[in-house]
Amino acid sequence: MDLHTHTRFSDGIGDIRDNIAEAERKGLRIVGISDHIHFFTPHVLNSYLSLINQAKKDSETIVLAGMEANILPEGVDITDDLRKRLDYVIASVHMYFNPGSHHKYLELVKTAIQDENVDIIGHFGNVFSYIGHPSIKDYKEIIDLAEEYGKGFEISTRYRVPELDFIKFCIKRGVKLVFGSDAHQPKDVGNINWGLKAFKRAGGKKEDLIFSELL
Ligand SMILES: [Zn+2]
Ligand SMILES: [Zn+2]
């Protein structure tokens, strides 16, 4: 599966059908379209969803309607109404942080985990090499919360995160995972090799994945 792909509806360069065609070519079982939320007006949203819904009928690969929301200091920028029209929502931190401020990043992630409109935390820790790595205790707090609220994490091949120990913790605690390429061009859809390897090395099995019932 690849649940993190972008199209022309945000900052990608392909059409929805191009991403799906690539997913079919690579033999993916599930592909999700997850464009950035802040690109959408109500009108554009309608055409996005109608194209995805049409593709659901036409495609051999299971197609899911997602979106990538932003985790901001004031909360995650997704509304209840929008969430109801989607199959899943990824929430990611896209803000800049100064070195040494990883606790601020973790606080944002904690608010997103507690947001009922969020299903998956995107590319968790992709900035840790700049802002500093959390401790094991910090990771445990995040995973406790994710377990309590039933949230999952993306294993991002683009950023090669989360780190292996974090993935292992997730599996041990029953916190679910998904694979994402974060493709911004169709040819990158389904590029989840790093993620698959990390997942297997961490001892992951099918039932450790979100949407495993569709696999
Ligand atoms: Zn992102
Ligand atoms: Zn993305």
Image (tube, rainbow, N blue to C red):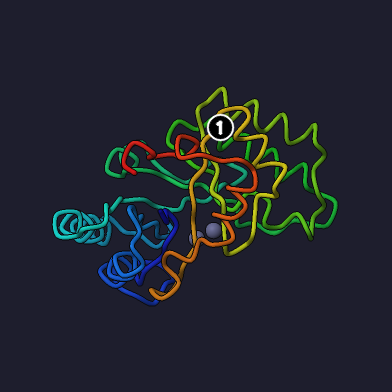
Can you say whether 21 is above or below 28 in the image?
below
Residue 128 x %, y %: 75, 54
Horizontal relation, residue 112 to residue 53: left or right: right
* Residue 194, horizontal then vertical, whole percent: 59, 60
In depth, the one of 143 and 71 nearer the eye is 143
Q: Which residue is mark 1?
A: 175
Q: Quadrant of residue 47?
A: bottom left
How crowded is the residue under tag 1: few (<14 C-alpha within 10 Å), some, or many (20+)?
many
Residue 83 location in percent, x, y? 34, 40
What residue type is disc 1 on? Val
Asked if 164 appears above or below 36 in the picture, the reply is: above
Q: Nearer the viewer, residue 24 or 19?
A: 24
- Name the residue located 59 percent from the left edge and 55 percent from the top edge: 197
| Residue 42 vertical position relative to residue 108 in the rendered view, above or below | below
Q: Is residue 40 left or right of residue 74?
A: left
Tell me the SS state at disc 1: loop
Q: Residue at x 67, y 34 (%)?
A: 169
